[in-house]
Image (cartoon, rainbow, N blue to C red):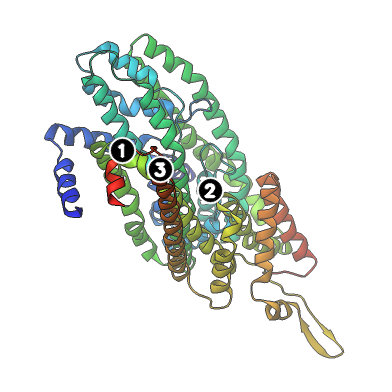
């Protein structure tokens, strides 16, 4: 049973040279998704610009259908650009079905529905993984190297790039070839939600660790009480190391969660740093 | 000399704006181009990395999700790094310049985005007119304006602002400078707060605490904590999947037990 499905999958994954050319073209053009976003359609215009040559090929005998597709795809669209290959590959395979189908037998609303249905889950996992976890870890490790001026930090890019490129290429290729069944099944089965949850957990763990190692709250206050030295930092360290960075970060989190303006929170932290330093409690 | 430096920093800012979006490559290549800028400016790449590390730390965790951009960390970081390199200043000075510039630069982005929004109607019109040439032309005009805006902003800021900033930086009193260093060290807390806000779910509390304790008590490096995070994520993934499977088989049983609701014979015989 298992064996059989893998062999049919392999056969299905064969792309004709024509399809390969299209897949490559789409892969490179999908790199442009994030540019020139608008408030009303976000990436809608970029989507159309990216797919125009592909649509032109698909609807080469039918300019009416080509312009209809262009108009239809100008709709609101917004997802994590890294994950767009999956939606893009699917959309192109559906447009091809539309081109082959006799007039008025293919409901193009399905294409829009698929795009709207997938862009949310894709952004959920994509933002969590790429912006929240992957880039966070890479930058965190990079800061460690760069702080001491170590040029080896440039090699980090070799580690950083592959997931981004692989998901773009294989996501687009597989979704184009395997079609909507598999991906909508993954969304329906809750597999996407599970992935997003698991990725969020990695993110939360890393953030916890980062607070301990990267947020600085250097206390310099010390005094003598009855001849014994009283060092404020030592007192806090005895309670728990890193307790002040933790309280500061959780404080920021609570304020942001309550809907406070991030700029105000940021200015508040800067003011806190200055005031405590002028009072002689913290110092560099 | 200043003209050349301004030109290089302008190019670097434009490159950053281009490469930050193209294929999302900028996101996964931290510090890659910092040494290049230093070499082009005739400064030490090692110093540049140390300065950029301080800037990256101050912006750490500030992420741009979808439409919302709280700070333009790319542009602010470029100018902070550029000024600090030209004026041979300490990392703390770079942070002091980068943070306010990043907040001001958001205004420029909002203006650009407003212009892109008014262009959407024009794109719509070109599609109605079936004019692909004009559609593509407007796209490339947008791209050119986008890149040129940031080139010119950085170029002019360095060309016209360096003397003023030099005077400002050299007049900073010492206690102010240590206040600045302390504030820069605290800033990652804001970014951490933003990240937590994005992923937070009370069920994740144990993992947050575990991550913190691994860092605070065991002093584990970031890589090790990340790998522990992967372990936690996998555990929860398998638990979730198991719960999901149990739920589904319960549903399937309910369906097969119910009268004449199943039309899936295969499933029925598999039971």
Q: Nearer the viewer, residue A14 or A42?
A: A14
Residue at the disc numbered 3: A187
Which of marks 1 and 3 precedes in the sequence?
1
Decide if residue A16 is in sight here.
yes
Task: Please state if B70 lies on the left or on the right of A162 as rendered.
Answer: right
As drawn, the label of residue B63 is 2
Task: Please state if B55 lies on the left or on the right of B257 as rendered.
Answer: right
Check the residue under mark 1 and report the chain it is in: A
Q: Nearer the viewer, residue B238 or A124?
A: B238
Q: Residue at x 54, y 73 (%)?
A: B214
Q: Residue furthest front?
A: B259
Q: Nearer the viewer, residue A18 or B202?
A: B202
Q: Secondary structure at mark 3?
A: helix
Q: Are marks 1 and 2 in contact (CB under 8 Å)?
A: no
Q: Are marks 1 and 2 on the same chain?
A: no
**Image location (x, y in percent) of residue B174:** 71, 64
Residue A251 falls in which quadrant of the image? bottom right
Q: Are marks 3 and 1 on the same chain?
A: yes
């Amino acid at each position: 049973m298992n064996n059989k499905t893998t062999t049919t999958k392999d056969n299905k994954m064969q792309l004709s040279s024509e399809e390969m050319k299209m897949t490559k073209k789409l892969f490179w053009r999908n790199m442009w998704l994030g540019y020139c976003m608008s408030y009303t359609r976000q990436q809608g215009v970029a989507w159309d610009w990216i797919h125009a040559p592909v649509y032109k090929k698909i609807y080469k005998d039918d300019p009416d259908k080509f312009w209809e597709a262009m108009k239809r795809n100008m709709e609101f669209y917004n997802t994590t650009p890294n994950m767009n290959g999956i939606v893009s590959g699917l959309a192109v395979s559906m447009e091809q079905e539309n081109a082959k189908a006799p007039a008025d037998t293919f409901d193009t609303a399905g294409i829009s529905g698929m795009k709207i249905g997938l862009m949310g889950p894709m952004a959920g996992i994509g933002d969590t993984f790429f912006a929240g976890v992957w880039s966070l870890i890479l930058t965190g490790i990079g800061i460690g190297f760069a702080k001491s001026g170590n040029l080896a930090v440039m090699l980090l890019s070799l580690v950083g790039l592959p997931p981004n490129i692989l998901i773009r290429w294989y996501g687009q290729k597989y979704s184009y070839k395997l079609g909507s069944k598999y991906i909508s099944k993954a969304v329906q089965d809750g597999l996407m939600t599970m992935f997003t949850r698991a990725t969020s957990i990695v993110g939360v763990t890393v953030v916890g660790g980062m607070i301990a190692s990267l947020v600085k709250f250097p206390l310099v206050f010390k005094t003598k009480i009855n001849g014994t030295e009283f060092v404020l930092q030592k007192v806090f360290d005895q309670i728990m190391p890193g307790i002040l960075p933790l309280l500061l970060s959780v404080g920021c989190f609570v304020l942001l969660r309550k809907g406070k303006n991030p700029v105000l929170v940021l200015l508040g932290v800067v003011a806190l740093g200055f005031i405590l330093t002028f009072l002689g409690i913290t110092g560099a | 000399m200043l003209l050349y430096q301004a030109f290089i920093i302008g190019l670097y800012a434009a490159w950053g704006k281009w490469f930050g979006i193209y294929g999302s490559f900028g996101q996964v290549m931290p510090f890659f181009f910092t040494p290049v800028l230093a070499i082009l400016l005739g400064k030490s790449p090692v110093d540049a990395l140390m300065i950029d590390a301080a800037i990256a730390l101050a912006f750490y965790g500030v992420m741009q999700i979808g439409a919302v951009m709280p700070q333009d960390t790319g542009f602010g970081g470029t100018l902070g790094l550029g000024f600090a390199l030209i004026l041979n200043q300490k990392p703390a000075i770079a942070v002091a310049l980068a943070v306010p510039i990043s907040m001001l630069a958001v205004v420029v982005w909002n203006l650009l985005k407003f212009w892109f929004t008014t262009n959407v109607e024009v794109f719509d019109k070109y599609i109605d007119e079936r004019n692909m040439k004009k559609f593509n032309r407007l796209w490339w005009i947008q791209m050119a304006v986008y890149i040129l805006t940031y080139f010119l902003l950085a170029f002019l800021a360095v060309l016209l602002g360096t003397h003023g900033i030099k005077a400002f930086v050299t007049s900073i009193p010492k206690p102010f400078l240590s206040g600045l260093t302390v504030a820069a060290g605290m800033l990652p807390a804001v970014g951490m707060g933003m990240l937590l806000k994005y992923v937070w779910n009370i069920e994740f509390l144990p993992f947050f605490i575990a991550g913190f304790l691994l860092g605070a008590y065991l002093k584990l490096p970031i890589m090790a904590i990340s790998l522990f995070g992967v372990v936690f994520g996998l555990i929860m993934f398998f638990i979730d999947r198991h719960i999901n499977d149990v739920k589904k088989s319960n549903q399937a049983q309910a369906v097969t037990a119910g009268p004449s609701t199943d039309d899936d014979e295969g499933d029925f015989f598999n039971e």
